[in-house]
Image (cartoon, helix red, strand yellow):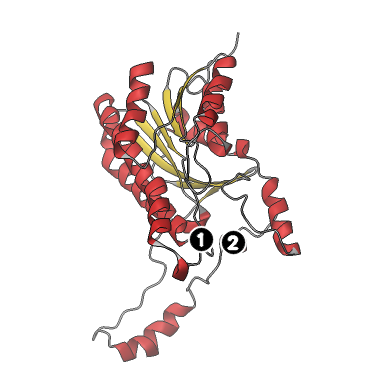
């Protein structure tokens, strides 16, 4: 007789679950006993268009394997749509226990050329979408005094990346959102954590591969498949992660990282106070040794995935 899964009887909403990382999360959650709302608007990478096929196909795979799932095509960027996503879980499965905020789009561009439209579109899906779905679920979590959020951030925000001001800002906003949820809802036994995934998907499939260095980087990324991310999500959503909240993790192939959070690292003091001149003469030399360089994610995670 099969052992019960880590999420037996739980009801999960997974956004952006029609393809890539979200699909693998939905499949593994279902394998561990969760009933899953597979949400995906089915848009192109830049957010244009809609296609109900990917969500329906993922839900069908779950059901064919003996699991329970429904497809949902609402947009997380629409507060009313986000509310309907959560209500679909409650109406169909009777409750809501887990929210995975994974949905996202990309509209990359150098900052000084970035349009208001491209800025807003990415913020609306990533940051506002995470807020909208979390807010819709929070009422149920508060009433039942239990629940779990897993939000997806990125090293593009945590470390840095070129040409992704909108995406980086949204992903750092999600870190602040997750920490605030963890603090505000701990009294209701609600947990909230972030994951920065490294995995080859259409979200990073647009990375240039024109030079030998770029080709080598893409080859490394292609070895990091989406299913490597899902086990960490299932763990964080399970009772095995009780007491784990307000944290930021990264998953890179077979590596799991705990990511640091901003804290003071050095200070200078001057009893008579500071002037702009004394800051330049005394404070700056004392602090400069601990400045962070203008790294991008590939500089910090420079070794081959293992």
Circle 1 residues within 10 Å: few <14, some 14–19, many ≥20: some
Residue 183 vs 230, above or below: the answer is below
Depth order, front residue of 10/190: 10
Q: Mark 1 points at which residue?
A: 159
Residue 124 vs 80, above or below: the answer is below
- Image quarter in which the N terminus is found: top right
Residue 44, position in %: x, y? 52, 43
Question: What is the number of the mark on residue 146?
Answer: none
The quarter of the picture where residue 231 lies is top right
Q: How far apart are marks 1 and 2 (CA)?
A: 8 Å
- Identify the element where label 2 is drawn: helix
Relative horizontal placement of residue 101, taking residue 79 as reference (left or right): right
Residue in the image at 59% along x and 50% along y: 204
Relative horizontal placement of residue 16, taking residue 256 as reference (left or right): left
Question: What is the number of the mark on residue 300?
Answer: 2
Residue 93, position in %: x, y? 38, 17
Mark 1 or mark 2: name the one nearer the start of the chain. 1
Circle 2 residues within 10 Å: few <14, some 14–19, many ≥20: few
Q: CB of mark 1 within 8 Å of CB of mark 2?
A: yes
The quarter of the picture where residue 192 lies is top left
Residue in the image at 50% along x and 49% along y: 46
Q: Which residue lies furthest to the top in this view?
A: 1
Residue 177, position in %: x, y? 34, 48
Q: Which residue lies furthest to the right in this view?
A: 212
Judge whether residue 305 can be spotted in this image.
no
Q: How many labels does the image show?
A: 2
Judge whether residue 201 can be spotted in this image.
yes
Relative horizontal placement of residue 121, taking residue 27 as reference (left or right): left
């Amino acid at each position: 007789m099969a052992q019960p899964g880590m999420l037996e009887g739980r009801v999960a909403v997974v956004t952006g679950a029609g393809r890539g990382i979200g699909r693998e999360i939905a499949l593994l959650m279902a394998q561990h006993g969760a009933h899953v709302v597979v949400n995906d608007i089915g848009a192109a990478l830049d957010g244009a268009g809609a296609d109900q096929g990917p969500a329906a196909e993922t839900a069908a795979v779950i059901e064919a394997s003996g699991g329970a799932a429904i497809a949902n095509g609402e947009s997380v960027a629409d507060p009313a749509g986000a509310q309907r996503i959560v209500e679909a879980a409650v109406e169909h499965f009777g409750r809501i226990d887990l929210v995975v905020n994974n949905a996202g789009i990309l509209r990359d561009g150098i900052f000084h050329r970035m349009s208001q439209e491209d800025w807003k579109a990415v913020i609306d899906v990533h940051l506002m979408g995470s807020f909208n779905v979390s807010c819709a679920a929070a009422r149920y979590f508060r009433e039942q005094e239990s629940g779990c959020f897993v939000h997806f951030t990125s090293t593009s925000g945590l470390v840095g990346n070129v040409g992704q001001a909108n995406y980086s800002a949204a992903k750092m906003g999600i870190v602040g959102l997750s920490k605030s949820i963890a603090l505000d809802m701990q009294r209701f036994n609600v947990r909230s954590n972030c994951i920065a995934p490294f995995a080859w998907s259409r979200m990073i499939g647009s990375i240039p591969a024109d030079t030998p260095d770029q080709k080598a980087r893409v080859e490394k990324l292609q070895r990091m498949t989406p299913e490597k991310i899902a086990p960490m999500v299932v763990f964080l959503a399970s009772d095995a992660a009780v007491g784990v909240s307000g944290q930021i993790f990264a998953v890179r192939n077979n590596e799991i990282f705990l990511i640091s959070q901003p804290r003071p690292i050095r200070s200078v003091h001057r009893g008579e106070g500071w002037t702009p001149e004394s800051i330049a003469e005394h404070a700056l030399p004392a602090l400069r040794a601990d400045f962070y360089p203008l790294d991008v994610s590939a500089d910090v995670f420079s070794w081959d995935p293992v």
